[in-house]
């Protein structure tokens, strides 16, 4: 049974500082990142190879990376961070994001194309990005 792990709101300071550099005067609605601890049965059956990216490094501050991507208006829809690892792979499972559309800019944030071996993780933190209408 999934256990609710909380909700992370996008930092007002980060969004305001990013929007201060824009020409448009109307503030944009702030996305909300919901986080939930799940088991690997909650993973998608298939990941879209054009919209899925794994983090190159074994450790990650997922909230910070997601906030940075959202400030740069990368269309992140979902993400998964491994918590409990079951595999013997030397790389192990990696933080993985799914975009709404392909955006090669994520490569500059430490990501590479592909799913990060999440099937080896028994428990994961799933992040869902909600955008207010």
Image: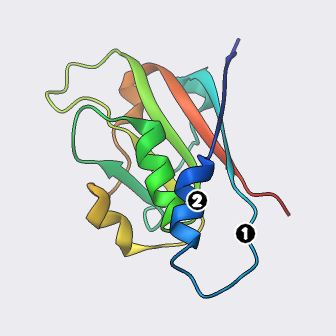
Position of 60 compared to 130: left or right? left
Residue 89 x %, y %: 19, 26
Left or right? Give the position of 38 relative to 56.
right
In the figure, is residue 29 to the left or right of 51? right
Q: If you read the primary sequence from the N terminus, does the residue marked by circle 1 or circle 2 appear first?
A: 2
- Taking depth in this image into account, of 10 and 117 the one nearest to the observer is 10
Q: Residue furthest right?
A: 133
In the rendered image, residue 95, in percent from the top left (x then y), is placed at 38, 39
Q: Give the vertical position of 35 relative to 132 (above or below).
A: above
Query: Which residue is at the far bottom?
Result: 23
The answer to whether the residue labelled 1 contacts the one labelled 2, judged by CB atoms less than 8 Å apart, is yes
Q: Residue at x 37, y 35 (%)?
A: 61
Is residue 127 at least partly visible in the picture? yes
Residue to which mark 2 is pinned: 15
- Residue at the image position 71 percent from the left and 11 percent from the top: 1
Say which mark, if any, is on residue 117: none
Q: Quadrant of the C terminus?
A: bottom right
In three-dimensional space, the C-alpha distance between marks 1 and 2, rounded to whole angstroms, equals: 9 Å
Residue at 73%, 70% in the rendered image: 27
Give percent across and percent down for residue 11.
Answer: 59, 46
Q: Secondary structure at mark 2?
A: helix
- Where's residue 58, x and y in %? 23, 33
State the residue in front, 40 or 9: 9
- The residue where tag 1 is placed is 28
Q: Is residue 55 left or right of residue 20?
A: left
* Displayed quadrant of residue 87: top left
Residue 99 lies, with reference to residue 130, above or below; the image says below
């Amino acid at each position: 049974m999934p256990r609710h792990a909380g909700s992370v709101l996008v930092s007002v300071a980060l969004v305001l500082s990013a929007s201060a550099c824009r020409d448009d005067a109307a503030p944009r609605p702030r996305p909300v990142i919901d986080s939930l601890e799940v088991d690997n049965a909650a993973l998608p059956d298939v990941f879209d190879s054009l919209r899925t990216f794994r983090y190159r490094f074994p450790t990650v501050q997922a909230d910070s990376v997601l906030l940075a991507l959202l400030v740069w208006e990368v269309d992140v829809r979902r993400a998964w961070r491994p918590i409990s690892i079951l595999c013997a792979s030397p790389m192990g499972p990696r933080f993985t994001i799914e975009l709404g559309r392909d955006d090669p800019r994520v490569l500059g944030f430490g990501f590479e194309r592909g799913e990060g071996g999440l099937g080896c993780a028994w428990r994961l933190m799933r992040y869902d990005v909600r955008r207010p209408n």
